[in-house]
Image (spheres, rainbow, N blue to C red):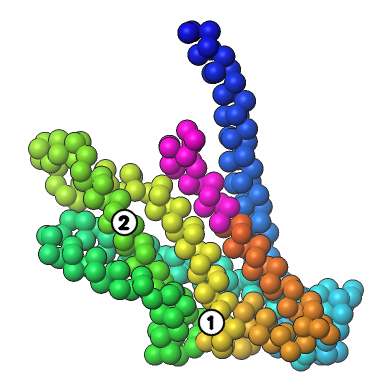
């Protein structure tokens, strides 16, 4: 029997090693993809090939040494717009996730600690908000506030906070059911201390994974709002507006649509890969599988 167990362990070792390499590869690929967009946005803070409103180029130029990605139908440099669009996408993603994290954490903890009737009320309200698509809720907020970059950030963040709040509530209530919470309360620890010492450290890994996924959703929502004309107003370039402006010339000048589309896919795919890698690290059962 011991020989069979030894053989099984020896056979399982290569599989575990391959699984570890696979998880590491997913994280590396995701980090490289996301870092390429971050680098593009950082460079745009210090250098741009042209001014955003510069229309000195020939209309619908093909990629060349002067305009690396060509120009749009107004003669603006597409590389400049792509770099500024990367900055806007990251700003909206980070700002929206920050708002969702703060509001979601507060609401989720309140629901986890609340009386049953208040918990049921908050849970029902969160379910109603989650039932609406993020883009629809964002469009309603932007319609009230007016189209701007900060309105888009606020709108997407508010829409995503319900998802974060429900996750925080579930994770926090799971932690509150553990025996060490009862022991901590018996020893005289007050609820703020329990939150800081036990709940937040235990829910942080899964919450981080969810926020990474919400980042990708926020980037897609911002691109959709900009495509509909509800995002950052001109002259600020965004990938969604670039796609909207290029749809009429996609056959004659396809780079105008392909470039922002590829950038959008690279960023969202990179963030999702990072979230998948973090999930494998944060969830012991997935590591065992």
Q: Is residue 119 above or below residue 137?
A: above
Q: Residue 40, percent across and down?
A: 68, 65
**46 vs 281, nearest the viewer:** 281
User: Residue 156's image quarter?
Assistant: bottom left
Q: Residue 225: give its label.
A: 1
At a point 83% along the width and 79% down the height, the residue shown is 70
Q: Residue 28: give its label.
A: none
119 horizontally vs 289: left or right? left
**33 vs 137, nearest the viewer:** 137
Residue 96 part of the magenta-drawn span: no
Residue 70 makes an appearance in the image? yes
171 horizontally vs 185: left or right? right
1 horizontally vs 79: left or right? left
Cα distance between the residues tagged 1 and 2: 28 Å
At a point 13% along the width and 41% down the height, the residue shown is 185
Q: Residue 267, percent across and down?
A: 62, 63
Q: Residue 130, percent across and down?
A: 36, 70
At a point 54% along the width and 46% down the height, the residue shown is 277
Q: Which residues are magenta?
A: 272-289
Q: Residue 168: give its label.
A: 2
């Amino acid at each position: 029997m011991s020989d069979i167990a030894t053989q099984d362990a020896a056979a399982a070792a290569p599989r575990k090693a391959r699984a570890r390499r696979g998880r590491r590869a997913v994280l590396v690929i995701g980090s490289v993809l996301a870092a390429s967009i971050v680098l593009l946005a950082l460079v745009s803070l210090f250098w741009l090939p042209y001014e955003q409103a510069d229309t000195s180029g020939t209309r619908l130029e093909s990629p060349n040494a002067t305009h690396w990605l060509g120009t749009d139908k107004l003669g603006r440099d597409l590389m400049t717009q792509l770099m500024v669009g990367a900055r806007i996408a990251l700003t909206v993603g980070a700002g929206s996730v920050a708002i969702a994290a703060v509001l979601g954490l507060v609401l989720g903890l309140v629901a986890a600690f609340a009386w049953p009737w208040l918990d049921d009320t908050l849970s029902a309200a969160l379910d109603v908000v989650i039932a609406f698509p993020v883009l629809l809720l964002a469009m309603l907020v932007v319609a009230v506030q007016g189209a701007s970059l900060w309105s888009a950030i606020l709108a997407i963040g508010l829409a995503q906070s319900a998802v974060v709040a429900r996750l925080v509530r579930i994770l926090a209530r799971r932690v509150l059911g553990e025996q060490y919470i009862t022991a901590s309360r018996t020893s005289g620890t007050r609820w703020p201390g329990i939150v800081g010492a036990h709940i937040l450290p235990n829910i942080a890994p899964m919450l981080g994974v969810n926020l990474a996924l919400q980042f990708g959703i926020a980037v897609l929502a911002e691109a959709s709002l900009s495509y509909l004309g509800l995002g950052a107003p001109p002259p600020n370039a965004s990938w969604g507006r670039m796609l909207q402006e290029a749809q009429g010339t996609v056959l004659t000048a396809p780079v105008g649509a392909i470039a922002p589309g590829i950038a959008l896919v690279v960023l969202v795919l990179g963030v999702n890969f990072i979230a998948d890698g973090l999930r494998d690290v944060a969830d012991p059962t997935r590591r065992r599988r």
